[in-house]
Every structure is written in structure tokens, then in C-alpha cells.
Amino acid sequence: MGFTQPFESGSARKFIESRRAPRFKLEVDIRVYPRNRAVVRGHTVDISESGIAAMLLQEVTLNEVVRLEFTLPTGEVEVLALVRQRSAFRYGFEFIEGGPVRDLISRACRDLAVKQSLSEPLPH
């Protein structure tokens, strides 16, 4: 029995590629607006140019498009995202909106990369 290459499907390849974006620690309040439901509040864990992770106390439906609102050092963000994954209370959101908001997120990630690299201890 031969093995096929399991990561050749488009969705698997997209998932792997989305993981290539480095993540940066970010702890700020976040508001999640699911369609036809009340706002869900939480706290972010980390961010990358392709998405954000957050701890939420209320459930959000996987594969649903939601509106996220949170604050970055570079400004206020309001962006559409897809609920990609859930592990207990931790949710992963993939940004699906481009344009100026993605530029703002990219700039914040670059700033966080510099800031966090300067705060890491030097190897002995």
C-alpha cells in the first residue's frame, strides 16, 4: 500500500502556508461579532499577518465569517475573519479582508517583531 502526499490538497496547503507567518505575542481586548448574535468578548493571545488567536468564554461557530475589533499599537482594527480553529476556549481567526486594514496589521506585526526580538535574552 503506497502513501499519497497528504498535503497536496489546496486546503491543506493553504493551512500550512498560513502557519508560515510568524506569530507575535499580543494581549489586548477583542470583540467578536458573529452574524445574528450578540458580541462575544475575549482577550487576544498572539497575532500574525494572516490571523489572530484569542481566548473567548462564549462559543463561536467554526467556519463562520465574523467581524473582529481590537486595538494594535498602530491603531484601531476592524476586520472580517473566518473562525478557523478551536481548542477549548482558544480560537484561531484567519483574516479574509485586504486593503488598508491588512497594511495596518502588517505594520503592527513588523513593529512587534522588532520589539519582541529586542526583549529576548541573548544566548550565552
Image: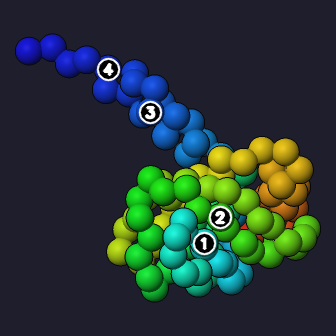
Colour treatment of the image: rainbow
Image spot of residue 114 (x, y percent): 85, 61
Q: Nearer the viewer, residue 80 or 84?
A: 80
Q: How far apart are marks 3 and 4 (CA)?
A: 14 Å
Q: Where the C terminus falls, by quadrant? A: bottom right
- Look at mark 3 in the image and give the residue it sits on: 11
- The residue drawn where x is 52% and y is 70% is 36
Which callout, 1 or 4, points at the residue further toward the start of the chain? 4
Q: Residue 5 carries which label?
A: 4
Rate crowding at label 4 as few (under 14), some (14 to 19) or many (20 or more) other CA atoms within 10 Å: few
Question: Which element is circle 4 on?
Answer: loop
- The residue drawn where x is 42% and y is 34% is 12
Q: Distance between the residues labelled 1 and 4?
A: 38 Å
Q: What residue type is labelled 2?
A: Arg
Which residue lies most toward the front here? 36
Question: Which element is circle 2 on?
Answer: strand
State which quadrant residue 53 falls in.
bottom right
Rate crowding at label 2 as few (under 14), some (14 to 19) or many (20 or more) other CA atoms within 10 Å: some
- Look at mark 2 in the image and give the residue it sits on: 67
Instruction: Select label 3 or label 2 by which is in front.
Output: 2
Which callout, 3 or 2, points at the residue further toward the start of the chain? 3
Question: Which element is circle 3 on?
Answer: helix
